Image (cartoon, rainbow, N blue to C red):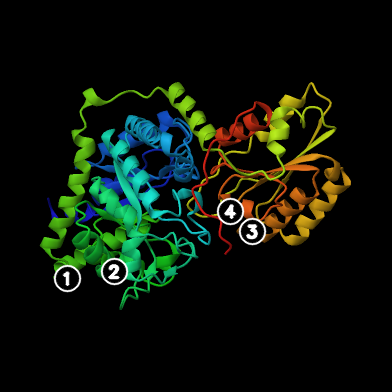
């Protein structure tokens, strides 16, 4: 390999558009980029992305790593042409009896469908141990229990990789305790190294033992580690000292996107990329800007020429990268199975039903509904107040509206019940919440049953004020938290409290089935409710 080819292999790049274009072709043929990451912006459907990936691979001299964030639940880049599965916290909610089966099925479906389209690497699972104050992880995590995160994470790694697709655990060494979203700014965590070893590192250690192919860094400063002032992505002590030397990780370490605010707000990005590589990162992820990709590759070449980048470091990184790429290259076609999308979709709904959790119901609202004592089809009015599903962090792509109103409206069309459906903005302010609540009260909320659907209300005070008001005023109420379950801490104790851990169509069908088809929520709450 030439020097240019070696350097190019160290980079995973984002491209624009939904087909092979001149810029992508240039980055692969002239700059030898070793990997590509695709986002929702690149995908319109299964056939389209399969053709695009084939075109990208045809431009590469060496095997191309094609990656995607297909975490399930909140973060899915591919929703058309693939099965929409729930995410980590939903898996954790399914309970002991289902963990083995559901982790195997989740991994099998994900690997089969990604491999069918040409993907070689899934940037999942998230192994961050969740904390209520984290604005960007939440239900992307399995739990606030590191041992449960470790167990389920290792199971997903194995099932995905058994299907011929590499897994990448993230975000090392764990950022569940961060109170700032790294897409916007640089989080700081005060954990000591011993605390990290006993908590955040537990899931990663288990994943290494399970043979995970790749890991991704966290743009977080771990100030509790003695002498540490750099984000982990730039820290030799964290990346090489802890991950590679202490934990013995032999795969490639991928940076999180080097265009995030946590990096670009504080460092020259091309210099930060080189610093990260010398600290122990093997693949530099630059998701958006072609000019930065080229500038950084050229900067690496300059560093090699002047002697700051040695052949030994290059060789180690390339060995790790090609070891990962070998999984897809060596996966025998005889072992490949074409996806059965109908069967996979049936599992997705079964999974959503199994994860739905009745957190509490102190006044027996759900029992009254399901026993017919409170027949929602015989009430004069039924209120459905829903948050508008929208992206609240930069990692998300929201492409669908809740089908709950349409499902209920269709159910009530031959009854005399009037459905009053109101939608509100996720970031509704206090004045807007009070105004909407007053309007609902004037339309009979106090004499009627109500369903209120929240969307991370525990982070947005106006939304929480509205949900509390609705559940206090309604004659009977059901509160449904469709992202983080912590919303349910802030609603009235007289409400029936349901957690879905996701807002996809399967989740909303589970809610509908609970209200109108007698589905018994069997999920268990995977996190503890502790006041912030």
Mark 3 or 2, nearer chain start: 2
Local packing at callout 1 (Cα closer than 10 Å; few below 14, some 14-19, many 20+) is few
C-alpha separation, residue under disc 3 versus residue under disc 1: 48 Å
Q: Secondary structure at mark 1?
A: loop
Q: Is residue 402 left or right of residue 381?
A: left
Mark 4 or 2, nearer chain start: 2
C-alpha separation, residue under disc 1 versus residue under disc 4: 49 Å
Numbered badge on residue 504: none
Quarter of the figure that contains the C terminus: bottom right
Kindly identify which residue carries mark 2.
235
Residue at image point 35% right, 67% down: 195
Residue at image point 25% right, 69% down: 237
C-alpha separation, residue under disc 3 versus residue under disc 4: 12 Å
Residue 107 vs residue 378, the one in the foreground: 378
The location of residue 198, given as percent across then percent down, is 33, 62
Mark 2 or 1, nearer chain start: 2
Q: Secondary structure at mark 2?
A: loop
C-alpha separation, residue under disc 4 versus residue under disc 2: 33 Å
C-alpha separation, residue under disc 2 versus residue under disc 1: 17 Å
C-alpha separation, residue under disc 3 versus residue under disc 2: 34 Å
**Tags 2 and 1 touching, CB below 8 Å:** no
Q: Secondary structure at mark 4?
A: helix
Kindly identify which residue carries mark 4.
486
Nearest to the eye among marks 2 and 1: give it.
2
Mark 1 or 4, nearer chain start: 1
Res 327 → quadrant: top left
Mark 3 or 1, nearer chain start: 1
């Amino acid at each position: 390999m030439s020097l240019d080819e070696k350097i190019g292999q160290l980079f995973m790049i984002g491209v624009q558009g939904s087909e092979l274009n001149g810029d992508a072709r240039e980055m692969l043929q002239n700059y030898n980029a070793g990997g590509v990451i695709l986002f929702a912006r690149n995908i319109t459907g299964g056939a389209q992305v399969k053709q695009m990936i084939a075109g990208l691979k045809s431009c590469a001299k060496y095997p191309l790593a094609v990656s995607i964030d297909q975490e399930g639940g909140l973060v899915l880049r591919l929703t058309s042409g693939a099965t929409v599965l729930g995410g980590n916290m939903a898996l954790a909610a399914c309970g002991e009896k289902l963990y083995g089966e559901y982790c195997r099925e989740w991994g099998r479906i994900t690997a089969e469908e990604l491999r069918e389209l040409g993907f070689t690497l899934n940037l999942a699972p998230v192994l961050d141990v969740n904390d209520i104050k984290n604005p960007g992880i939440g239900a992307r995590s399995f739990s606030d229990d590191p041992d449960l995160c470790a167990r389920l994470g290792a199971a997903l790694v194995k099932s995905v990789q058994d299907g011929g697709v590499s897994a990448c655990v993230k975000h090392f060494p764990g950022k569940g305790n961060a109170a700032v979203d790294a897409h916007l700014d640089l989080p700081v965590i005060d954990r000591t190294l011993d605390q990290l070893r006993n908590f955040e590192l537990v899931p990663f250690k288990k994943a290494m033992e399970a043979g995970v192919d790749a890991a991704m860094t966290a743009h977080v400063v771990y100030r509790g580690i003695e002498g540490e002032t750099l984000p982990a992505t730039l820290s030799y002590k964290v990346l090489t000292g802890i991950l590679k030397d202490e934990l013995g990780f032999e795969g490639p370490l991928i940076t999180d996107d080097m265009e995030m605010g946590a990096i670009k707000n504080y460092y020259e990005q091309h210099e930060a990329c080189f610093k990260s590589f010398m600290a122990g990162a093997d693949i530099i992820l630059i998701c958006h800007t072609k000019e930065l990709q080229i500038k950084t590759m050229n900067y690496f070449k300059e560093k090699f020429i002047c002697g700051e980048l040695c052949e030994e470091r290059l060789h180690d990184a390339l060995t790790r990268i090609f070891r990962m790429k070998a999984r897809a290259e060596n996966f025998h076609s005889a072992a490949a199975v074409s996806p059965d999308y109908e069967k996979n979709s049936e599992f997705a709904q079964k999974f959503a039903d199994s994860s739905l959790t009745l957190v509490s119901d102190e006044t027996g609202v759900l029992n009254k509904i399901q026993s017919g004592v409170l027949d929602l089809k015989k009430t004069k009015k039924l209120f459905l107040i829903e948050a508008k599903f929208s992206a609240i962090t930069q990692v998300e792509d929201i492409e669908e509206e809740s089908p709950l109103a349409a499902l209920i409206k269709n159910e009530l069309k031959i009854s005399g019940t009037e459905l009053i459906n109101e939608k509100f903005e996720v970031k509704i302010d206090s004045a807007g919440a009070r105004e909407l609540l007053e309007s609902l009260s004037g339309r009979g909320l106090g004499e009627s049953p109500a369903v209120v659907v929240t969307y991370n209300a525990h982070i947005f005070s106006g939304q929480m004020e509205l949900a509390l008001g609705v559940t206090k005023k309604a004659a009977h109420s059901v509160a449904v938290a469709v992202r983080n379950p912590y919303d349910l801490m802030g609603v009235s104790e007289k409400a029936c409290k349901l957690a879905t851990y996701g807002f996809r169509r399967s989740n909303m069908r589970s809610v509908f089935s609970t209200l109108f088809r007698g589905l018994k929520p069997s999920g268990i709450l995977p996190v503890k409710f502790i006041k912030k």
